[in-house]
Image (cartoon, rainbow, N blue to C red):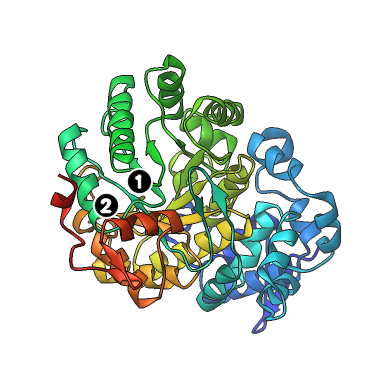
Amino acid sequence: MNLKTRLYGKVYQFQNVTDVLAKASELKSGDTLAGIAAENTLERIAAKAVLSDLTVHDIRENPVVPYEMDAVTRLIDDDLDAEAYKKIEHKTIAEMREWILDGKTTGNDILHASRGMTSEVIAAISKIMGNLDLVYAGNKMHITATCNTTIGEEGVLASRLQPNHPIDDVEGVAATTLEGLSYGIGDAVLGLNPSIDTFDSTLAIWNLLGEIRDKYEIPTQTCVLSHVTTQMEVLKSGKGKADLCFQSIAGSQKACEAFGISTDMLEEANALFRDRGSAKGKNVMYFETGQGSELSSSAHNGSDQQTMECRCYGLARHYEPFLVNTVVGFMGPEYIYDTKQLLRAGLEDVFCGHLHGLPMGCDVCYTNHMPVDQNDSETLLMLLANSGCHYVMGLPQADDIMLMYQSTGFQDIAAVREIFHKKPIKEFEDWMIKWGIWENNRLTEKAGDPTMFF
């Protein structure tokens, strides 16, 4: 395994595969903060050249966190399809990139091969792709999952209705939910981030969202994004039910422990919600991720944030989730600094999620201390609509008044659906037509008026 190359008369020697992966990454402020980024563009190009010549076998045999010390590594490696791996193990990363981008290679071909790829292999492939490559390849793959409805059908851009409230006031949550529904938002999930992570608050919002769904016969899913242990406690009590079980996850065992979770806990939650939740289908988990979380908990093991993010997807695919999304700018400028880094991270994450076989969405967001604005969010939203992204977030005026960051609004999603000829999930589209807010593949004049539900 050669970790050395010569570029413009200078020899670049890398310490190990982890070092190559880190220095081959596009510039991210988090990697610079961690002291593992390439020192300059030439070193980054040299690392990409070395990475291109490594094989799938080389990468698999050198995970960024050793197998014997990390449950996430073990789960990712143990889940590999032996036959799929055998067919590609001697291919170089450059050869895998070219094969994926070949017009004759189908999405199904790619997804079959991906069963033999570890998360580090998938990260490596993405690191030698340009932004257009990520959009083109991501759009090839069509991954479906079923909870109450099925997400991921071709031509669909779904949305999560995110009715967050600073104090989880049920009337405020209900008002935002009805407004979003009037714009055709919420086909992926009606999902609230609670400001109060308690049994009572989770139960109250579960019941509220369930009542709205049932009263208006809305074909969708419900979820409250409290800690997985809180949701399991409420479900076990028999006092309430939800369709999806949520949890933020990370790319190493140590980082997962910082979130208060383990692989066994996620296994228990998945089984519990399949057995006692209200979902009709088998895909009952909802995971959120975001580049930089492992570094923020000092649990990245010297690896770059994008590779660790890919390992989140390797963890997620074990549980066959209904939804996964990257919260791409929420960590702030310490990890994703500016527009260029935001766009790159969003495209990387959706492509890598798809290559893991996941129904991948994106919260196109940014904090107010980043040198990013709403124009940048809208640009990424349009790029993601062309990359096969499964769903995005819908908030009033794109402003999350509880989490205090900016995202994408109800009207933004409606406009992107119209421009790029995207539709809501089929059953939800039929519901919109029934209520008179969708006709001829666009919103009607009646849309945006929540008083229709009163």
Nearer to me, 447 or 408: 447
Kind of residue indicated by mark 2:
Leu
Residue 69, placed above or below residue 43:
above
Residue lying furthest front in this view? Answer: 434
Could you tell which of marks 2 and 1 lies nearer the N-terminus?
A: 2
Nearer to me, 351 or 329: 351
Residue lying furthest top in this view? Answer: 237
Nearer to me, 433 or 129: 433
Report the quarter where the C terminus lies: top left
**Which residue is under mark 1?**
218
Q: Residue at the spot x=85%, y=62% of the render?
A: 87
Judge left or right: residue 83 versus residue 230: right
| Mark 1 burial class by Cα count in 10 Å: few <14, some 14-19, many 20+ | some
Question: Which element type, helix, strand or loop, lies under badge 2?
Answer: helix
Q: Residue at the spot x=27%, y=52% of the render?
A: 181
Marks 2, 1: nearer the viewer: 1
Identify the disc placed on residue 181. Answer: 2
Choose top left, top right, bottom left or bottom right for residue 68: top right
| Mark 2 burial class by Cα count in 10 Å: few <14, some 14-19, many 20+ | many
Choose top left, top right, bottom left or bottom right for residue 370: bottom left
Report the quarter where the N terminus lies: bottom right
Q: Residue at the spot x=35%, y=42% of the render?
A: 191
Residue 188 drawn at (x, y percent): 41, 51
Judge left or right: residue 121 versus residue 319: right
Q: CA distance from mark 2 to mark 1?
A: 9 Å
